[in-house]
Amino acid sequence: MTHQQLVIAQLNRIPSTLELALQIRLKLPLLPISEIEEKAVNFYLRFDEYGLGLQSTTKKAPGSLYVDFKRLTKRVGDSVLQQNLFKAIGARKGKRPGIVDATAGLGTDSFLFAAIGCHVLAIERNPIVFALLEDGSNRFLRLGALEAEIIERIELCQANFLEAAETLESTQVVYLDPMFPTKNKIAKAKKGMYYLQELIGSSSNDKELLEAAYTVATERIVVKRAKNSPFISVKEPSISFRGSSSRYDVYLLN
Ligand SMILES: C[S@@+](CC[C@H](N)C(=O)[O-])C[C@H]1O[C@@H](n2cnc3c(N)ncnc32)[C@H](O)[C@@H]1O
């Protein structure tokens, strides 16, 4: 996916401040929404009443994708520490490790870590995905004091983890979720995955990500994989937590 196939939609006759600021930041064309269909555009970004959304122009594409942390809050219930994601990062009573989420994407995992009390550095290299993530964080932050407390535990960073790793402070856990399921395995319901796959395609830096993670993590590296995928490296993980569709491979460092 190249930037030329992506534009920012101008919803009214005069562009809004948000639209103009995004245009300058992402260096994308701003196009009146009425003209988008006739141009060869694959995706457009739009600011509407729900926030910043990404929309595909493909006929069968799902509706716009927004980062919506509000819908995630119900996943953080009483039995939260029983969930594989949290077991994998080593969270337990009295322990909330610091985390570098090196492939933050739409921020679902970063948000869940922060919601249980972890401090998270969320790194995302794709500027479009990062803009969606930042917009979702800002909207959630404004909902109230409790919401702000969660978001304040997340530091967002637009960077390539492979380049940033050597400048980062050592952190207890590095979390990696670089993999996309192949297209035909993406359930229609998983709008976020559909869009990430369409926008970014498959990642090919998995092994390098693991190597870079070793230079930052002090306690463990956690790699999210599809349930039956091979390990990310020839080195076997110390332990794996298996769920119905995914698996968390944990590389213990001490
Ligand atoms: C499967 S998504 C992550 C989903 C995320 N765990 C969530 O909860 O939304 C993978 C993301 O990793 C990002 N990514 C891949 N390689 C990266 C790198 N070297 N540095 C930073 N981000 C990277 C991609 O741009 C993509 O957004």
Image: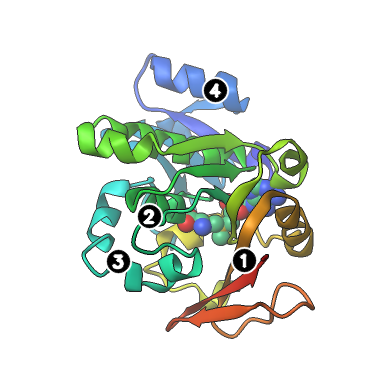
Which residue is located at x 54 percent, y 23 percent? 23
Q: Amino acid at mark 2?
A: Leu
C-alpha gap between disc 4 and disc 2:
30 Å
Give the mark, 1 or 4, whose residue is nearer the N terminus.
Answer: 4
Q: Is residue 198 above or below residue 234?
A: above
Give the mark, 4 or 2, whose residue is nearer the N terminus.
Answer: 4
Q: Is residue 170 above or below residue 233?
A: above
Q: Amino acid at mark 3?
A: Val
* Residues under numbered marks 2 and 1 in contact, where contact means CB atoms less than 8 Å apart: no
Of 194 and 205, the residue lying toward us: 205
Of 105 and 53, the residue lying toward us: 105
C-alpha gap between disc 3 and disc 4:
40 Å
Which class describes the residues within 10 Å of circle 4: few (<14), some (14-19), or many (20+)? Answer: some
Residue 192 position within the rendered picture, expressed as x and y whole percent measured from the top left: 44, 57
Which residue is located at x 56 percent, y 51 percent? 101
Give the residue at mark 3. 80
Marker disc for residue 179: 1
Residue 118 position within the rendered picture, expressed as x and y whole percent measured from the top left: 42, 49
Q: Is residue 89 above or below residue 185?
A: above
Mark 1, mark 4: which one is toward the viewer? 1
Give the residue at mark 4. 23
Local SS, label 1: loop
Q: Toward which corner of the image does residue 146 lie, by quadrant? A: top left
Q: Can residue 129 be seen?
A: no
Local SS, label 4: helix
Q: Can residue 189 be seen?
A: yes
Asked whether mark 1 lies closer than 8 Å to ligand 1, one says yes
Marker disc for residue 112: 2
Q: Amino acid at mark 1?
A: Met
| Relative to 149, 95 lies left or right | right
